[in-house]
Image: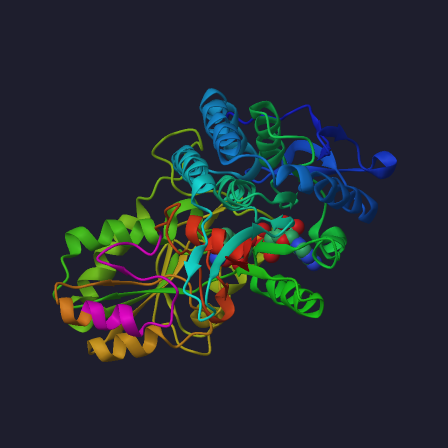
Amino acid sequence: MDTKTTSKTLQHFIGGSWVDAEGGATFEVLNPLDDSLYCHAANGTGNDMRKGIAAAKNAFPTYKETLPKERERWLLRVAEIMEERRDELVDCLIDEIGSPFQKAMFEFDKGLTMIRAAAGLCRNVRGETIPSDAPGKFSMSIREPLGVVAVITPFNVPLIKTTRLVANALAVGNTVVHLPSEMAPHLTVLFAEIVAEAGFPPGSYNVVTGFGHEIGDDLTSHTDVDFVTFTGSTVIGQHINEICAKNKTPNTLELGGKSPTVILADADLDEVVPLAARSIYMFAGQACIGSSRYYVERPLYQEFVKRFSMVASKIGMGDLRDPKTVIAPIISDRQRNRVREHIADAVAKGAKVVAGGEWEGNRCQATLLTDVTEEMTVCKAETFGPVSSIYPIDSYEEGLEKANDTEYGLSSAIFTKDIDKAFHFARNIGAGMCHINGPTIHDEAHVPFGGNGESGVGREGTDADMEAMTELKWVTVQL
Ligand code: NAD
């Protein structure tokens, strides 16, 4: 297997300079495929984080006065340099987090569109004129950037999340302090190199690497942080929400999911099965919007189970650099144990494994379960692995009810030719996103992306981030 180790020790990027952690401490980042050493990274302390925040705060008054055309030029330059350094970014996505080549390329292409869409956002930070009851008074709302934005990103799609959130924050005139996942710091360090080369002023973008559970609170609870955008697990999102509530810091939270797919009896299985497989097995199910529950109307149920299991058993598990490979290693021991426990618990309580269930090194085979009941952990909890359950339903109404039987509410999908049922589902599913005749895994730069309930608060995307990361100010002129 061709894996690469960077000899680099990654540093923080603060105020336009590359600096070691206080005391020079570092930590190891492992390649999840074989747990070999990938690189070392600066092990940030609370003081390092405070330096990052101070740099962003100092840069803000000047940065917010930069012109839309300057920010647009810098962002478009970021996209150009990303293309020049594509192989390096793709290699990093493969070796740092175990992305198969096809997922790494998908993420790279998506990341480019995020940056270009953010460049367009620079000219779209708009308020409005408002009629006034006061004679001779001209009344308007203007949008102002908030100040320092804290960006906290997960391991699984580090480039998509970094490009979207950092670029949108910078596009509307904020400065940024970024805490990347301790499992994916190199990707963010590469991005910081690109941002610096593109011409963004020192202090506009700062990166502090380290462990979230050690220095995350130093970021989210700091009174100089004006907005927090967090993507990660529900439990940490809840913790951050409580900190932000105390300080009245506005925030968006993009958290976990248990996204359902409903398949009605009139659906075409030739079309549905490949999309169903894509919905759960891409990056081995380590996707927040992956579909881990399939509700299939009884006339199609047996055939769906048969065909889906056949596809699952052939899903590519070869070299990560082979474009046909789909199944990735599970990122860490903790996550591997969770996947193992979910499968073992289900089997012990009577579920049938109709595909997969075995491991090859750190990779779990594409796994499908039937006969899953509510007592099984896998029924309701997020697995974050290549494991999905298939349930029979007797009607559309039962499918909707079961799809809604969750505390999460991120993505959802329905396959049917019945437009009335499809739209009824879209309107009544308690999820932030619904795809009719398409997979739960879908994202674009300019859409309102996000979830409800345990899946989060607020939406991301160019328009949503523009609204969340700026504030309206009411201004009048007495003429
Ligand atoms: P995680 O919650 O373990 O870590 C996410 C980030 O939080 C990391 O950068 C970590 O360092 C940081 N962190 C940890 N403790 C912190 C604290 N006290 N304060 C501030 N930051 C802290 O999640 P993960 O394992 O990296 O990612 C997987 C999870 O992310 C899954 O639950 C998945 O569903 C979710 N996710 C959601 C979306 C979405 O858009 N809804 C997208 C991707 C991933």
Q: What is the x, y in percent for residue 468?
A: 52, 57
Nearer the observer, 340 or 413: 413
Q: What is the x, y in percent for residue 25?
A: 82, 37
Q: Is residue 434 magenta?
A: yes
Q: Is residue 336 visible?
A: no
> Is residue 394 found left or right of 476 in the rendered image?
left
Q: Residue furthest top?
A: 84
Q: What is the x, y in percent for residue 52?
A: 74, 42
Q: How many marks?
A: 0
Q: Is residue 460 magenta?
A: no
> Is residue 327 found left or right of 153 in the rendered image?
left
x 36%, y 75%: residue: 404
Image quadrant in which you'd find residue 411: bottom left
Q: Residue furthest right?
A: 23
The answer to whether 149 is drawn above or below residue 248 in the figure is: above
The answer to whether 167 is drawn above or below residue 310 in the figure is: above
Q: Dividing the image into four equal quarters, which quarter contains ligand 1?
A: bottom right
> Is residue 350 found left or right of 244 in the rendered image?
left
The answer to whether 251 is drawn above or below residue 424 in the figure is: above
Q: What is the x, y in percent for residue 324?
A: 34, 34
Q: Is residue 65 visible?
A: yes
Nearer the observer, 349 or 39: 39
Q: How is the image coloured?
A: rainbow
x 33%, y 76%: residue: 402
x 57%, y 49%: residue: 154
Q: Which range is magenta?
A: 422-441
Image quadrant in which you'd find residue 121: top left
Nearer the observer, 43 or 130: 130
Nearer the observer, 451 or 195: 195
Image quadrant in which you'd find residue 393: bottom left
> Is residue 379 found left or right of 216 in the rendered image?
left
